[in-house]
Image (cartoon, grey):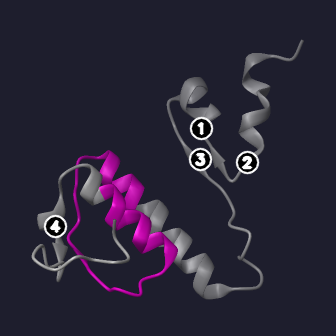
Amino acid sequence: MRAERYDMTRYHGLNLHSYWYRSTIEFRYHSAVLHKMDEAMQWIIFTQFLVELSNGTIPVVDYYPKANKWMQTIYKIYLAFGHKDRINGLRPDKPQSTVS
């Protein structure tokens, strides 16, 4: 049997096992780091968003109907937790097809 600290979940890009072992979360590489710089930068922005959110900071973000998948995820998180007012440009009177 392997030691608890060597749980197989620690070998992923988002190491949640570290949370139970060290009370930290490790964000590791993104698969696009060597080939798609834009995608890698969006991954960095997304992980920093998660850090800010975990600290209790709810950054104001701008709404773009054709935003990338990371921004779409941020919109969904905000809507799920009742932070619609922190999304600039989101019109509550108009249905948003990309944010549901």
Q: Estimate the spatial distance between the alpha carbons at disc 4 and disc 2, rounded to whole Å.
A: 31 Å
Who's the residue at 24% across and 49% down the image? Answer: 81
Numbered label attached to residue 5: none
Comparing labels 4 and 2, the label whose residue is closer to the camera: 4
**Considering the numbered disc 4 on the image, is that residue within a helix, a strand or a loop?**
helix
Percent coordinates x, y for residue 25 in the rendering: 54, 42
Q: Is residue 100 above or below residue 50?
A: below
76 and 70: which one is in front?
76
Disc 4: CA contacts within 10 A as few (<14), some (14-19) or many (>=20): some
Drawn side of residue 52 relative to residue 9, left or right: left
Q: Which residue is labeled 4 in the image?
A: 86
State if disc 1 and disc 2 touch (CB < 8 Å). yes
Pick whichever of labels 4 and 1 is earlier in the sequence: 1
Query: Which kind of residue does numbered mark 2 sit on?
Result: His
Q: Which residue is labeled 3 in the image?
A: 26
Pick whichever of labels 2 and 3 is earlier in the sequence: 2
Disc 1: CA contacts within 10 A as few (<14), some (14-19) or many (>=20): some
Query: Which kind of residue does numbered mark 1 sit on?
Result: Leu
Comparing labels 4 and 1, the label whose residue is closer to the camera: 4
State if disc 3 and disc 4 touch (CB < 8 Å). no
Which image quarter holds the N terminus? top right
Numbered label attached to residue 12: 2
Percent coordinates x, y for residue 98 in the rendering: 38, 76
Query: Is residue 96 rendered magenta in the image?
Result: no
Query: Which kind of residue does numbered mark 4 sit on?
Result: Arg
Pick whichever of labels 4 and 2 is earlier in the sequence: 2
Q: Which residue is labeled 1 in the image?
A: 16
